[in-house]
Image (cartoon, rainbow, N blue to C red):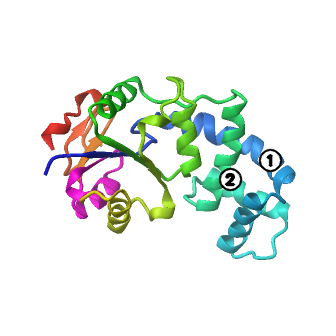
């Protein structure tokens, strides 16, 4: 079955891990407390604050305690949906103000543009919120790349290391799993995608292998006709 769609991870795959840990996370840690104190009553923010209270088992936590919990989660890189949503709101302010520019590897930029021009559907699946995904590509160092993608998926579609999440995405984009190639730098994610029937390709930018999967160190080495 020929590949018709590419589903890609971001962190470590299209973009440097260091951008997330050395730029985005510190920016969120610096700006999140004041953002929440200023916007706590905004409906979309209030919903996420309540989700933090429920997820943490502290339903009566005041705003300052919620901020404390979120900063702890951020330091631990916890894949919590409300944290990701709130981070995305803070990052949006930074991107819009020109304080942040999304990092995307040049080889990824070139391949994504080429695949889009050739008619392949492109999708993103990342643990970062959909809002954050749109921003990293829409406000990238290479310009606005958001128009290359047909859709974005985050942890609301399920954990990235569970097979059912990839089936959910396949159904959402109305493509058989066999027509989708998933790209990631995490072997457990690749295993989950392969278990549901997707083609897989590991991206190991520093070399090495991701056991059980074809592996490249650059998007330039990916031949979609070989899957």
Can you give x and y, in whole percent of width and height, for residue 41 in the image? 84, 60
Q: CA distance from mark 1 to mark 2?
A: 9 Å
Q: Residue at x 75, y 41 (%)?
A: 30
Q: Secondary structure at mark 1?
A: helix
- Above or below for 114 versus 166: above
User: Does the magenta-highlighted stretch encompass residue 159?
Assistant: no
- Residue 176 visible? The answer is yes
Q: Is residue 58 left or right of residue 112?
A: right
Q: Earlier in the sequence, mark 1 or mark 2?
A: 1
Please give the label number shown on residue 35: 1
Instruction: Place residue 29 in its image quadrant.
Output: top right
Q: Is residue 220 left or right of residue 14?
A: left
Can you give x and y, in whole percent of width and height, for residue 104 in the image? 46, 30
Count the labels in the image: 2
Q: Is residue 63 left or right of residue 187?
A: right
Dot 1, crowdedness within 10 Å: few (<14), some or many (≥20)?
some
Q: Residue at x 49, y 23 (%)?
A: 142
- Above or below for 138 versus 85: above
The reply to whether the C-beta atoms of the residues labelled 1 and 2 are less than 8 Å apart is yes
Dot 2, crowdedness within 10 Å: few (<14), some or many (≥20)?
many
Q: Which residue is mark 2?
A: 86
> Which residues fall within the magenta stretch?
177-198
Please give the label number shown on residue 224: none
Q: Residue at x 48, y 38 (%)?
A: 17
Q: Secondary structure at mark 2?
A: helix
Asked whether 4 or 93 is in front, the reply is: 4
Q: Is residue 63 left or right of residue 17?
A: right
Asked whether 142 or 13 is in front, the reply is: 142
Can you give x and y, in whole percent of width and height, for residue 26 in the image? 67, 39
User: Does the magenta-highlighted stretch encompass residue 192?
Assistant: yes
């Amino acid at each position: 079955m020929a590949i018709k769609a590419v589903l890609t991870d971001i962190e470590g795959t299209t973009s440097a891990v260091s951008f997330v840990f050395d730029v985005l996370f510190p920016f969120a840690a610096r700006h999140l407390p004041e953002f929440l104190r200023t916007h706590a009553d905004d409906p979309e923010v209030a919903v996420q604050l309540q989700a933090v209270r429920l997820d943490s088992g502290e339903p009566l936590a005041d705003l300052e305690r919620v901020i404390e919990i979120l900063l702890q989660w951020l330091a631990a890189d916890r894949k919590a949906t409300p944290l990701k949503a709130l981070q995305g709101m803070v990052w949006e302010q930074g991107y819009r103000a020109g304080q942040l520019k999304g990092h995307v590897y040049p080889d990824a930029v070139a391949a994504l543009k080429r695949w889009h021009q050739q008619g392949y559907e492109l999708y993103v699946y990342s643990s970062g919120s959909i809002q954050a995904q749109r921003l990293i590509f829409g406000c990238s160092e290479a310009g606005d790349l958001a128009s290359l993608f047909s859709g974005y998926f985050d942890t609301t579609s399920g954990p990235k290391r569970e097979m059912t999440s990839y089936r959910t995405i396949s159904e959402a984009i109305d493509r058989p799993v066999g027509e989708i190639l998933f790209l990631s730098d995490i072997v457990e994610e690749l295993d989950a995608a392969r278990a549901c029937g997707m083609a897989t390709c590991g991206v190991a930018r520093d070399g090495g292998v991701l056991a059980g999967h074809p592996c490249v160190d650059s998007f330039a080495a990916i031949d979609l006709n070989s899957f």
